[in-house]
Image: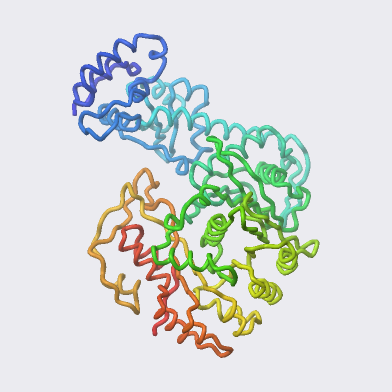
Amino acid sequence: MNAVINQTEKELDIQEVLSWLEEDGMVTAENAKMLRMLAVSPEYQEKNALIVIAERQWVDQRDEHGVLDLEVLTVWLSDRAQLPYYRIDPLKIDVTKVTSVMSYAYASRFNILPISLDDQFITVATAEPFVKEWEQELSRINTKSFKRVVANPDEISRYLLEFYTVSKSVNRAESESQKNVAADVSNLEGLMDLGRAGKLDANDQHVVNIVDWLLQYAFEQRASDIHIEPRRDLGNVRFRIDGVMHQVYQVPSTVMAAVSSRIKILGRMDVAEKRRPQDGRLKTRTPDGTEIELRLSTMPTAFGEKLVMRIFDPEVLVKNFKELGFSQSDDGHWQSMISKPNGIILVTGPTGSGKTTTLYTSLKQLAKPEVNVCTVEDPIELVEPAFNQMQVQHNIGLDFSTGVKTLLRQDPDIIMIGEIRDKETADIAIQAALTGHLVITTLHTNDAPSAITRLMEIGVPAYLIQSTVLGVLAQRLIRTLCPHCKASTEVDESTWKALVKPWSPAKPQQIFKPVGCLECRNTGFMGRMGIYEMFTFSRNVKEQITENVNMSSLKKVAIKEGMKPLRLSGAQKVAAGLTTIEEVLRVAPPVDDF
């Protein structure tokens, strides 16, 4: 590829860019000629040359399956200009720092975006690699040197507006709070700083802008949870993406308090109450119009209220069980269980293991017009029109057991109980199963067979477990490898044995390892899926369930009857090239030796 050197100080010219693309064998002469004739009109002259060409969606002549989209053209231009290519990842940019380098007016004038600062250099992304005027001007007022990188012009324009808008909102919100002279001594270490700590209205437009940006940003980054964590001076905003926490932004404590209050107002929570934990929910829309529900939870901490928003994507309800991670045999067993007219089905696993998704997907499938599906939850995770959902409210005496008693008088066919926590709820669930209802509920245990001993600890007799429980599903969520960058690798004998011990399934010919690319933010993983331990109650299993049940014998029989422990389920995903051995070992509990 011919590099462009000694380029004069000027913006990209579409005629010249087309000539370069022809030189490099990327576009046909016919297409270039056609666009040259169109490019003389003013509407084309005002746009970046790469954007104009990308809009044509031409086939890349170097690769018949490739398209000359904006990303491909940007990478090509960076090579031509002999500058590094940079894919903007907003999670890796310190917005507060980069927006202090230059004003929004100046950055937008040249369509440049500062992306990082260190002790020596300021790195700036540009879509006009041959324009250096801004660099010379800024060097006069800045002691640091500048590094230029080439980035997608659309992304520069978009993040330029987003970063400076949120930074401006935070700064102005902080200025507003400092105008009010009032001491904030509501937290454990309240400081008598009368000149500084002010109250900021949660409905202030700057605060509204910050909350709107925060929610939109979370949706775009595929976050499952948003954490707003107060500290003495600067509070943290963090996202959980694919099960891992990422630092996103730091906000002055006075602004963070107003942001939390704004979200509490939207969630219909008591804004004045900051000493007790609260739960709430809100519904919003993504930029593309998709409705998203968020579950809110507050917790009093040393420096104020910590707020966590769990994001529920309604798209998960349209997924089938195979997309959730069920194997063919797991799917068959599960369909057999949920199609029974009566009995109890238990789903177990720790918080964040995907139990809610499994329950809702199952109920969505079962909720036909001829069936009455009722739920009692704490809290209602996702509002679904096909169900009749009841919220537990302890303050008025409406707990799970009271809720289930009420549901039994509502002529239900299928009942979902959010969680069995005590003997009273377990007794009511068993009564419902014995009187002809299908009950689906959750328990917190490490594996599926442990659900039996957990029920016995609560006080449920063995004979009732035998006669009512249809089966138990234990599950975990594992990160899946990024399809764009995963690479094959040899199977390490010792780690494979550690995964499948004490069994000896055939070692796969090859497995895959994470590499890291721009699509997955160099983590090597993108998205999550479930691994499952399906424990069905056959006649042989039921015979093992006695008041003095031997867990080792029970597990042996369960495995003989077809139960695959979580680690073996994970090993299948490893062999299929979906995840890594280390990821399964991290998530799934070890299997007892038999």
Please state if 405 lies on the left or on the right of 535 as rendered.
Answer: right
Farthest residue to the front: give it: 370
Vertical comparison of 580 with 29: above or below: below
* Residue at image location 65% in from the left, 32% down from the top: 172
* Residue at image location 56% in from the left, 57% down from the top: 360
> Quadrant location of the C terminus?
bottom left
Image coordinates of residue 239 in percent, x first then y, are 53, 49
* Residue at image location 28% in from the left, 19% down from the top: 17
| Residue 378 seen anywhere in this rendered image of the structure | yes
Please state if 42 lies on the left or on the right of 312 as rendered.
Answer: left
Please state if 461 lies on the left or on the right of 113 as rendered.
Answer: right
Q: How is the image coloured?
A: rainbow
Q: Quadrant of residue 2?
A: top left
Farthest residue to the right: give it: 396
- Judge by depth and name the residue closer to the eye, 413 or 364: 413
Q: Quadrant of residue 531?
A: bottom left
> Quadrant location of the N terminus?
top left
Q: How many marks do you count on the picture? A: 0
Image coordinates of residue 316 in percent, x first then y, are 51, 51
Image coordinates of residue 187 in percent, x first then y, are 73, 54
| Residue 587 seen anywhere in this rendered image of the structure | no
Vertical comparison of 106 with 251: above or below: above
- Judge by depth and name the residue closer to the eye, 519 or 405: 405
Q: Quadrant of residue 46?
A: top left
Image coordinates of residue 156 in percent, x first then y, are 44, 30
Vertical comparison of 558 with 76: above or below: below
